[in-house]
Image: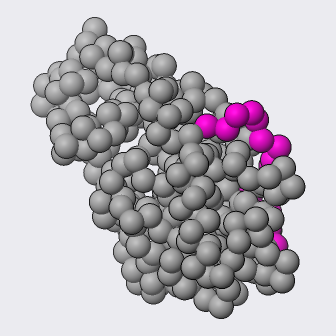
């Protein structure tokens, strides 16, 4: 637990090695506790949050509001463990997605990729998300957040900033008085595969547009989805630039490789991530799939059977 400001802390998992729950912003107010994101939907995950809150002299039963950045289970799965009285806010479909491991798997490794990468067609991750990450027993009632909404949590006010790409409809939340940005899995973090994205998540253009919105904000502290928070405007700006560069460099690398000669999906995968990443998160293939589908759509790439090539 790290103090960010009076009555504002960040709860960070001890490890960023998957499966690890995402960071949680803890906000104390006169009536209890509000959270931004809430970790896994497992009993172990809930116990971890309860123990961390206890270190601040707080009871998990004092949580009255959970504001969610995006519906991935390492950040949102825990909403199903809270009592019905707890107010849940977040992106559209949040409450339904956390109760359906098949829907979560479709977000992470969409069906379209099974055709794009036949060697990955038998990837089974539904049981993993259901068992290791935890899904809600039933859909959770939520209030849908819209772009530009301002959510008041105690003495803080958080502006909803659209930052798609990692997931469609994803939000970062900015507190202008404190200069704190809860940006979840938007900015690159040491020890993770971020920036990570899948087809249907808003695309690389959406991701870059969200990063540009962050770059325009007077952020002093950025709470990322995993790993340490960033302190200081220069550190936040550097991480924003690094993340943007990684996305653009992937596009350039793929097109350079496919200009040299046609390549299979499996061959291209060797160029995108260090292979040890695939041993931990085999759905890393979604990143390559996103770039290939975008290239095919904009006419810069083509597919011939199992091979991909640059056009022209």
In the rendering, at what x and y percent does residue 67 appear?
A: 71, 60
Judge whether residue 209 can be spotted in this image: no
Q: Give residue 35's position: percent from left, percent from top.
A: 68, 66
User: Which of the pair 76/238 is nearer the observer?
Assistant: 76
Q: Name the spot of residue 47 as percent of width and height, x first.
A: 57, 58
Residue 147 in magenta stretch: yes
From what the image shows, is residue 57 above or below residue 17?
Answer: below
Colouring scheme, one of rainbow, by chain, secondary structure, one colour: one colour
For the point 50% across and 81% down, which residue is it? 2
**Span shown in magenta:** 135-152
Q: Residue at x 67, y 56 (%)?
A: 68
Left or right of 1, for residue 228: left
Task: Tell me what residue is drawn at x 66 percent, y 82 percent.
Answer: 57
The secondary structure that dominates the magenta segment is loop
Task: Judge left or right: residue 272 versus residue 145.
Answer: left
Whether residue 81 is visible: yes
Q: Nearer the viewer, residue 19 or 58?
A: 58
Residue 293: give x, y in percent of width and height: 42, 27
For the C terminus, the quadrant is top left
Please determine whether, in this image, residue 1 is positioned above or below residue 37: below
| Vertical order, 51 against 204 (above or below) | below
Q: Kindly give the residue lying farthest to the bottom in the view shown.
A: 6
Q: Nearer the viewer, residue 105 or 271?
A: 105
Query: Residue sitting at 26 percent across and 37 percent down?
Result: 278
């Amino acid at each position: 637990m790290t103090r960010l400001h009076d009555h504002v802390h960040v709860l960070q998992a001890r490890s960023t090695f998957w499966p690890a729950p995402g960071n949680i912003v803890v906000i104390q107010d006169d009536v209890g506790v509000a959270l931004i994101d809430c970790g896994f939907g497992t009993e172990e995950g809930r116990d971890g949050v309860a123990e961390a809150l206890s270190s601040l002299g707080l009871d998990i039963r004092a949580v009255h509001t959970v504001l969610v950045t995006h519906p991935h289970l390492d950040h949102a799965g825990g909403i199903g463990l809270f009592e019905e009285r707890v107010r849940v806010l977040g992106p559209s479909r949040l409450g339904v997605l956390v109760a359906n491991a098949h829907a979560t798997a479709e977000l992470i490794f969409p069906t379209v990729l099974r055709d794009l990468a036949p060697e990955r067609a038998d990837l089974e991750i539904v049981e993993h998300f259901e068992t290791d990450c935890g899904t809600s027993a039933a859909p959770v009632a939520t209030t849908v957040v819209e772009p530009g909404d301002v959510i008041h949590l105690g003495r803080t006010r958080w502006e909803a900033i659209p930052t798609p790409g990692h997931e469609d409809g994803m939000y970062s939340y900015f507190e202008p008085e404190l200069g704190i940005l809860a940006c979840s899995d938007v900015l690159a973090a040491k020890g993770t595969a971020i920036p990570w994205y899948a087809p249907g998540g808003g695309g690389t253009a959406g991701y870059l547009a969200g990063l540009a919105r962050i770059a325009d904000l007077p952020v002093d502290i950025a709470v990322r989805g995993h790993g340490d928070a960033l302190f200081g405007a220069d550190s936040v700006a550097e991480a924003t630039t690094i993340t943007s560069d990684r996305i653009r460099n992937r596009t350039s690398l793929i097109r350079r490789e496919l200009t040299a000669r046609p390549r299979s999906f499996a061959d291209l995968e060797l160029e995108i991530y260090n292979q040890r990443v695939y041993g931990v998160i085999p759905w890393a293939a979604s990143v390559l799939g996103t770039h290939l589908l975008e290239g095919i759509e904009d006419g810069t790439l083509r597919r011939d059977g199992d091979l991909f090539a640059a056009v022209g």
